[in-house]
Image: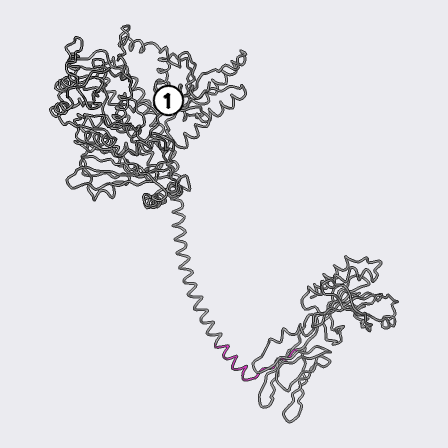
Amino acid sequence: MNSSANNLAKIVLTSLDENDVTFSHIEAKVAPILLEALLTIPRVSQISYIRKDGLFFALYSQADHQIFAVCSNTSFSNTTSDRINDPWYTQRVDYDTGNLYGEAIAFPSQVNETWLQKALKASNSSVLLGESLDHDKSPLVLNIARVDKKGVISLGFELKSLLDVFSVIKPFGGGLYLAIKGGQAFSDGIPNTRIVLEENATFSFQIMKANGVRIVLNLNYETPTTYVFDVSGTKYVLYASSLDIVGIETAYVLVLPYDDVQNRMHQNIVLVSILLSLMIVTVAISLVLTVKSSRTELRLRAALNKQKVATQQLERKSKNQSVAFETASHDIRASLAAISGSVEMSINENHRGPELVTDLKIIESSTKYLQGLLNSILDTSKIEAGKMELEEKPFDLVKVLEGVVDLFYPVGLKKQVDVILDLQDDVLTKFCQVKGDERRLKQILSNLLSNAVKFTSEGHVLVRVQARAMNPKSQSSTVGADHDQVQRWRSCFFSGSNEKFGDVEAVSEVDRDCNCMEFVFEVNDTGKGIAKEKRASIFENYVQVKETDHEFEGTGLGLAIVQSLVRLMGGEISIVDKEPEETGTCFKFHVVFKVFRSDPHVNSEDDKISMSSGSNTPFCSPKRKDHNSTNVVLFISSNERRKVARRFLRARGLKVFAAKDVGELAETLKEFRRPAFSSGSYLNLSFGYLTRPSRSPKEVPLSAMDGTDGSTARVNNWANVPGFVVLVIDTTRADFRELCRVVAEFRKDINDACFRVVWLGFRCMQVHGLDEKQLPPSDVIVPMPLHGSRLYSLIDEFRDKIPSTPRHTRRSPGIQEEEVVEITRISPSCRSPLRGKKVLLVEDNSTQQMIAKRIFLNNGVIFDTCNNGKEALTFVSKGLTDQKDLGASHILPYDYILMDCEMPVMDGCEATRLIRLMEKDYGVHIPIIGLTAHSEGEELNKFLKGIDIHVSKPLNEHKLLKVIEDLHSKNLF
């Protein structure tokens, strides 16, 4: 209360000029402040500002919230009579605007000169009793504070509102009495009783009995006292004392029934005793529990701290292990690359003896095994860390499949196991151009085929592929359920990959892409098979089938990596149950690729691409042609390959006749030998032939193949062949002389323009003393394996060629092949793009340096070598400075820089960055070729930012020349 008056006085003082204050100043500056204070300060019912010279302004509110203003605008002398005789005026106040309105009514002056003088002299606010300015004259508690030497502020609080706080006190059967000195008394207690405050700190407590007799008790309230008295037979206890209420001296009397007080005191004592006992018990229990909890907490904290220390140690160990593992993997890769490069160069120098070549090939095989083992471990680490990512780009799916099968065919051939590719439907060959991770798909197929060939001792390994077209209606039913399962697997398997692999939405995005197709792959072998109870754990890391022979060694990581990669590509892998009479294992997995749809009837020259390794026949996308008049005779020793080829060709409209042995082949060819067909012109194949050695171990007369005696060919009986005939002859497992005889008999009675012979197995024909130069021009030799798609493309080539005179390309009889080889081994190649170039080799590994130097010497390269990036900076800086001094700053000091990635002192990444900064000052750009043992990952991505192109170790001549060609194709020069 006091603070409100003081603060308001300070605010009013800041708004007035102390030397010259007029009523207009008060009305303009003080009145708004008083109105705002009246509306905001709680319990204030009246507020006024009065000056010593008689100027006065006050506001008060009534019960109906109507505000009135009382003011005096006339100043006077300091005589009291002038102050009393000077009238005041009252008007209504607008609640919203604060403006005065209505008639001004005269109002008698009510200034108390005593408290005004006292307030002007006091330094702090004071409190006294007064009356309100309204007609009720209700008692107020006036809080007065000095504004300056001539004016004061007064806040009026209704006394009743201040005492209402005591009205909530309702003693049981008693009462509470309050009396203000020299003023009123308030009672709320026993009926027929009242209190009267007297002078000299005394008060009288008056009791009216039923007979009208008044009993008066004169008591002193300054000293707290207790009295016991009787009222109508009831004993009461009276407590009297003084009380200061906001500076106003007040007396109170509390009256309670005597017996009730005793009972309640006893009850309270009992209750307090009970509560005290409960509190003691509770405190004791709490203390015990707290001690026990503290001990448990201490043990847990100690265990937690111990675990934190152990976790930190494990984290440091894991981090150090990762760094060490990365360094070790790089060193292993570098060492293996050095071994592989040395072996390759030593094998080429086979004049040292066949025993050395054999030993080197063993070393090369072991190196490849170690590289595969290291790659498996690295892939597993990346998968477990959630860092495996897909590198999606367009590729030809059929070409990838043929390439993988070609890779494992010679491996299976050593064990008499046939590796076969079965493209079941025509959809796959129509939509072979897809977008995905080609390298990971090859890795999946290679792992499955490697296991299949490894655990199959006889029979075959069949790779079957199907393509399922997807559309918005069938997507959810075809792959929706599988993809939901895949999402759950991926969310569990690659957790923590907020990621890098936290990308589960990519799978659901496939479901909504109508350009995607589902490709189902099967790898089916006729080997030992896997027991059903072992299938549940076969895809776990480091798990192998224990029943297998000890000769089949491995880490048990292959299938686990395969499953992870398949799931990463949005699919799932499983083992398919086979019929009881069937042997072996069938792995089935599906992935989803985005396809590039094109018109299958149109093929441009760009669509024609060369075959995978192992074939000399061009391959192009299948074209819809009329093959109803084409007849294909298949003589293939492998039953399963023969069935697959026959099914593939028949599905494309060709008439296929299959022969199991030479006798059946002879009978089949007799069906085509019918009379009445006139001669025609010869058909020119004009396709590219493989380059073969000019000499063969055995010479076979051409008459044995073309049915003539060496003189001018004579046709005695032209056959009337009902269409075009393609004869496919497998020479790998048949009696070659008998085959030659049957084919020769067939040639005698048929026009060469109406048939073609495809000989399978180039090496077998070499063994029998025959190469393609000894064949008729219409024949072709194709290495195994021959897939159905390749045979189909061969037939298209046969039908599309225009007849002309056939020619063979002959080697000019100059220098013999052995002489050319010997010369190129001694002197650098004249056609090498590196000849005369200056190269800076930055490599810390001495073995790698030796391999690179030999490659440089073989290609006529001028080179400098250094062991780390810091030395490379010195070489480049000196070279650029020398060129600038010679006035030829545009000439590069080096044509190429071969930069290793990881080296001591300064690695290749930092050296490349500094070289690029140095080049900016000279306005040049030196092509930098990165050398790294990393095939992917963060290290490679970091290295690729500054270099022009990179080549993976081991470095060999073919890789280096290929990189140089790629640099030139990018127009970097």
Q: Main secondary structure of the magenta part?
A: helix
Query: Which span of residues is magenta-colored?
Result: 252-270
In the image, taking residue 904 as reference, residue 412 lies left or right, namely left
* Residue 313: quadrant of the picture: top left
- Secondary structure beneath dot 1 equals loop
- Indicate whether residue 266 is drawn in magenta: yes
Near-viewer residue (895 or 874): 895
Residue 847 visible in the shown view: no
Q: Position of residue 495 (x, y in %)?
A: 38, 43
Q: Is residue 12 above or below residue 273?
A: above
Residue wearing tag 1: 845
Residue 896 visible in the shown view: yes
- Indicate whether residue 379 is drawn in magenta: no
Q: Position of residue 922 (x, y in %)?
A: 53, 19
Q: Give the quadrant of the N terminus.
A: bottom right
Q: Residue at x 23, y 11 (%)?
A: 694
Q: Is residue 172 above or below residue 150?
A: below
Q: Position of residue 675 (x, y in %)?
A: 15, 19
In the image, taking residue 656 as reference, residue 213 lies left or right, namely right
Q: Position of residue 604 (x, y in %)?
A: 36, 24
